[in-house]
Amino acid sequence: MLAYIGRRLGAMIVILFGSSFLLYNLAAYSGDPTEGLRTSTDPKAHQQLLSLIRTLHLNVPPPARFFIWFKGIIGGFTGNFDLGMTRDANPVSTYITNAIPVTIRLVLLSTILAILLGIGFGIVSALRQYSRFDYALTFFAFLLYSLPIFWVAVLLKAYLAISFNNFLLNGSIAPLWIISASAISGFFWAAVISGTRQRVLAIFGIAGSATAIFLELLSLNKWFTHPGLGPIMMLALGLGFALGVTYLSTGLGNKAALRSSLTVIVLGFILYFPVEYLLKKYGSLSTLFEMLLVTIAIAWAVGFGFAKIDRRPVIRTSILTSLFAALLFVIDKLMKSWVPYVNTDAVHQRPIPTIGQANDLLPSGNFWFTFLDTVLHLVLPTVALLLISMAGYIRYSRGTMLEVLNQDYIRTARAKGLSERTVIMRHAFRNTLIPITTIIVVDFAGVLGGAIITERVFGWRGMGTQFNNALNNQDLNLLMAVQLVTSSMVILANLVADLLYSALDPRIRVVGKK
Amino acid sequence: MSIFSRRAKSIEEQTEGDIFNKETEGLTQGQIVRKRFVRHRGAMVSLVVLVSLVLFVFSTLGFKIFGFGFNGWWKYKIIDIPELRTNGCSVALPGCPTLDLLPGKNFGLGDHPFGQDDLGRDYFALVMRGAERSIEVTVVIGLVAGVIGTVVGSIAGFYRGWVDAILMRINDFIITIPTIIVASVIGFHFGNKGVLFLAIFVGLFIWGGLSRLVRGEFLTLREREFVDAARVAGASNRRIIFKHILPNAIGIIVVSVTLLMSGAILLEAALSYLGFGVVAPDVSLGLLISQYQDSFTTRPWLFWYPGLIIIIIALCINFIGDGLRDAFDPRQRRRISHKDRAAERNPTAKKK
């Protein structure tokens, strides 16, 4: 195994060498960084020209200059990694190390959401093959696939940010909106759950009226201007989630799983005020992380205590439930900071920003303000990226699921009388995840490259911005650094995908290839 | 009953195979593919829409190649600057669109169907020119990348050994540079040399995925019995490649080239949007969107029309690709409709 990884890493250096050489020469031969200075009439220009030539080694022809650059990269093995200098004689590495976290923040959440939603929709669509829901979702996926992101972004800015901010000034929903939202929700749930005609109509009625009542209540209580969950609401949401996740994960027949997940939620409810106090008093990312670890440990212990045999699925269920509970706590805390946040001068009643990665005018020091600010700045780019990258997952997981459902072992599972839930979740779903895992990894690397457009549209200062600047200023070393990072991501992702594939699918052996 | 419930399938599964076999009896591969494609409703509708859109776009302004050509039927050219239309528009917003699809007095294209931009240029002419550019770029990228990808993939997969090793390393080099990066570098420097130049150059760098697929297909096909049979019968390598393997790999090639083209139109739009694609005196859909994105709140038509055209083209190509994939996939089984089952139960009914 180690030898295999070593061999692949060796090949990676060769490939990086080749692709960098290609791009380096392409970029170097097609533009001249000294052009502006040579034609300038400024008396200092000549001096600047000479120093530029010296720092960037411009007197060496590009194919040879590439090796000067590559020597700095290879230097990484002996500890003095060198990405070269920008045009202003600053080290490239500082620009890049500042830019990478921004880009990752930009794409991480949307990728996770796209994976979860895409796989969920794709699988339901496969289970309802050739139904109206399936056709509608297929059309929807193709539509998303054909959308230019910068076009969607303008629409989102107009309708999601500006209109929503206007709506928040008042906070009551117009009846027309309530009716259409209820109709959409009714159609959606009726299509997902499906059944006989009476059943579909009943589901449509129940889901539709539930949505209408819910929205009307929120609207009447001014919930949108004063959002919050509170312990009772959280208990209700948590119990609902506990039932749902137990049903999907082990089935409600597994009493130990059901009891442990419900216990986790009740524990969370009992501990509401202490946790609340802790979050308020010691708000920081590291505290959040520590509390998350404690939560998982408690959930593990609960699951361990309730299950006497076959502990793994029970522990899995209770940990999943506890993660949701933790998320609820964070959302609750964020919602509590909402009203003071919106009323600060920096925000001025327009909470959803159309551009930028953070509000610089916001008073610093309050962790929850900064957190909420980050989350709100993520809304638009995340929705835009989510819409676009979800389409691929929907199509791919639908196709894989259909393929898996045709396999003999599914027929066997059904033939031996397993419940449909067990067949789908334990036999089909897990095998569907194997090929999907590999495209997830590769896709994430691709998204990093695609962030160039997203960053431009939403005014984030990440890798994409560096790339744009580098290209416009003929800053070759900066350009190559961006390419190096994204290309390494692509190659590493491919390696991880192969390793994961062999780990998940015992039929595939990576080492046995001789 | 729940999310996992499924319809009773037993009868369906029993007869599915019979109906499927009966349907393809006595047909050649090409006929089966054509039959399946025609049955894919989304793909057929998209094909009709796409073909009519292309004809419409290219006849609007007319074109000229090597002295041949004709003038378009539209009264304005992109260089014309007619006066801003004021009657019928609100005072603050002259130049609003005249397109009216509702039956009535104003039905039809009118003077400026897509409105006018802030200078007064006819936006319909601009969008049509942009669509021309986008379609040209898409086709050229598809052709260049398709040909290179197929040739490289076939050679690597057929000859294997050191030829394969070298070609696949080059392929790796190209595939690891993200498309948008290499395309931006090319576009930034060559965008001013014309659209065709840009498209050809971009095409030279995005055949990586296709050639891998073709190579994989060749690697499996070359081990099949019919290739051995051809070789024993004395066929040359060239004949085996072109007459025996390539026709069997054509499905995967056609489908990937289609998807590549739908990606190419979005790529061109993105490049022009970033300013690394088609540049100012020329027009492209991405460029129009980037020029007028700030007008969204004041003159929304300047933003909507180019975007809608991009989406229609990309959507049609995607659906056609899906239809082709279904048509070429031998494992694909179509839904058995009630009509088929009735025909199965009562074979004479069909003949009436």
Image (cartoon, coloured by chain):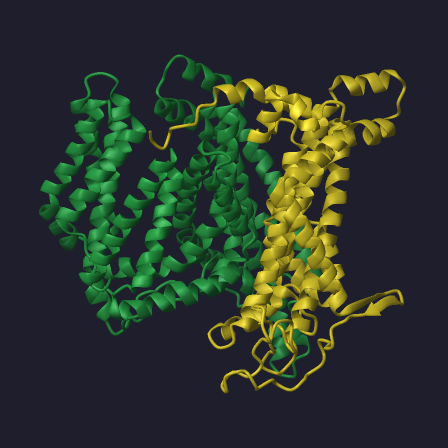
Chain colours: A green, B yellow
Residue most extreme to the top: A416
Residue B92 visible in the current orientation: yes
**Residue located 34% across and 37% down the image:** A198
Which percent across, then down, holds residue B80? 71, 81
- Choose top left, top right, bottom left or bottom right for residue A270: top left
Residue most extreme to the front: B352
Which percent across, then down, holds residue A204? 33, 44
For the C terminus of chain A, the image quarter is top right
Q: Nearer the viewer, residue B278 or A188?
A: A188
How many numbered discs sit on the rendered protein? 0
Q: Nearer the viewer, residue A196 or A420?
A: A196
Residue A18 visible in the current orientation: no
> Left or right: B22 with respect to A396?
right
Which percent across, then down, holds residue A190? 37, 41
Q: Is residue B269 above or below residue A504?
A: below
> Left or right: B14 with respect to A273?
right
**Residue located 37% across and 51% down the image:** A184
**Residue located 64% across and 24% down the image:** B20
Q: Is residue A109 above or below residue A265?
A: below
Q: Nearer the viewer, residue A320 or A162?
A: A162
> Left or right: A325 with respect to A1?
left
Which percent across, then down, holds residue B41? 62, 43
